[in-house]
Amino acid sequence: MRLLRTPEDRFTGLPDFDFPVHYADLDDSGGGIVRVAYVEAGPPDGPLVLLLHGEPSWSFLYRKLLPVLAGAGLRAIAPDLVGFGRSDKPVEIAAHTYARHVEWMRALAFDALDLREVTLVGQDWGGLIGLRLVAENPDRFVGVVAANTGLPTGDEGMPAVWWAFHDAVRKAQVLDIGRFVQSGCRTRLTDEVRAAYDAPFPNEMYKAGPRAMPGLVPVTSDDPATDANRHAWAVLSELDIPALCAFSDRDPITGPMAAVLQRSLPGAAGLAHPTIEGAGHFLQEDAGEELGRIVAGFVRG
């Protein structure tokens, strides 16, 4: 597996994102050593929160939450998915599979960092990957915050707006990462913030991850990930750990999944699930501090 590594100077001067960067080398059985990056904030002995981002963002997306969580005494860890952020980037689209992304994050969280008693915060692909981690490693988790995400099996259709995004990524000769993030926000991103989302990708060769991810979402019942996701649902539907749905009110892609998760997860029963008003798909951008307070209250409560 051929890997690219974004030069460090691409990440200088990022707005409000001066958190120390850490790296872990993962042994990928089919691709050699893959370096994964993560940032961390808060006391090292605080309750653990694992913040997983989605497509086509990176840990920069959590810059507004990290200080809030650290201020509440939590240890917050935000990795970059392989192919994103400061993590290594496989050049070939075919190197990216759903199972491989789950395994990369599992190896980081449990083999490299040995995280225990974790609360997952997953948005977009952060939930598609994170909910699989919870289902496959339930002894490692004490809570879940699902934020604009889901766990598709291909048994139900995807909304038209998602297909529009899927097709736009597939057809784009030049993939404008900053523009795609902006399209999922209700607030207007500054030029500096849009440039930060573009920073991990010096040219098109680095963008196999963002190009691959829409095609990895199960959209048919015979998708390679369908059986694993069905099994994950079976486990999650019996797993009684606290589960909070913190969705925004203006995300046409994942909005319907809030009710499904609340109905299906035993740990969601009896909780007051907040709806974050005026926020789009990337609610970390539109209402990051509010989401941070919700997560902190959930963990501390």
Image (tube, grey):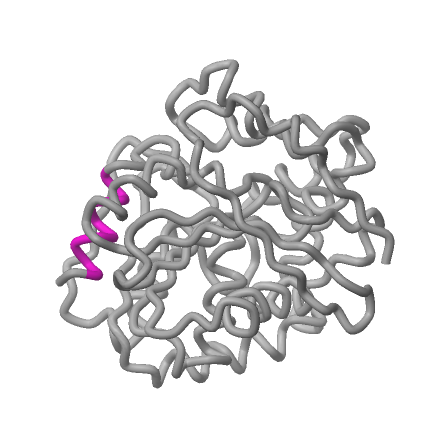
Q: Nearer the viewer, residue 62 or 171?
A: 62
Q: Is the C terminus in the top left, top right, bottom left or bottom right quadrant?
A: bottom left
Q: Is residue 294 left or right of residue 55?
A: left
Predominant secondary structure, magenta span: helix
Disc count in the image? 0
Q: Which region is colored magenta?
A: 290-299
Q: Is residue 210 left or right of residue 22?
A: right
- In the image, residue 176 sits, relative to residue 97, either above or below, namely above
Q: Is residue 168 left or right of residue 107?
A: right
Could you tell me residue 251's position as x and y percent? 40, 40
Could you tell me residue 287's position as x and y percent? 30, 34
Q: Is the N terminus in the top left, top right, bottom left or bottom right quadrant?
A: bottom right
Q: Residue at x 52, y 50 (%)?
A: 38
Could you tell me residue 71's position as x and y percent? 21, 44
Q: Is residue 290 left or right of residue 214?
A: left
Which quadrant of the figure has residue 180? top right
Q: Nearer the viewer, residue 194 or 49?
A: 49
Q: Residue at x 44, y 50 (%)?
A: 254
Could you tell me residue 249's position as x and y percent? 30, 40
Q: Is residue 297 magenta?
A: yes
Q: Nearer the viewer, residue 191 or 162?
A: 191
Which quadrant of the figure has residue 278? top left
Q: Residue at x 38, y 74 (%)?
A: 116
- In the image, residue 173 sits, relative to residue 38, either above or below, namely above
- In the image, residue 186 sits, relative to residue 212, either above or below, namely above
Extreme top residue here? 191
- In the image, residue 12 sits, relative to residue 170, either above or below, namely above
Q: Is residue 144 magenta?
A: no
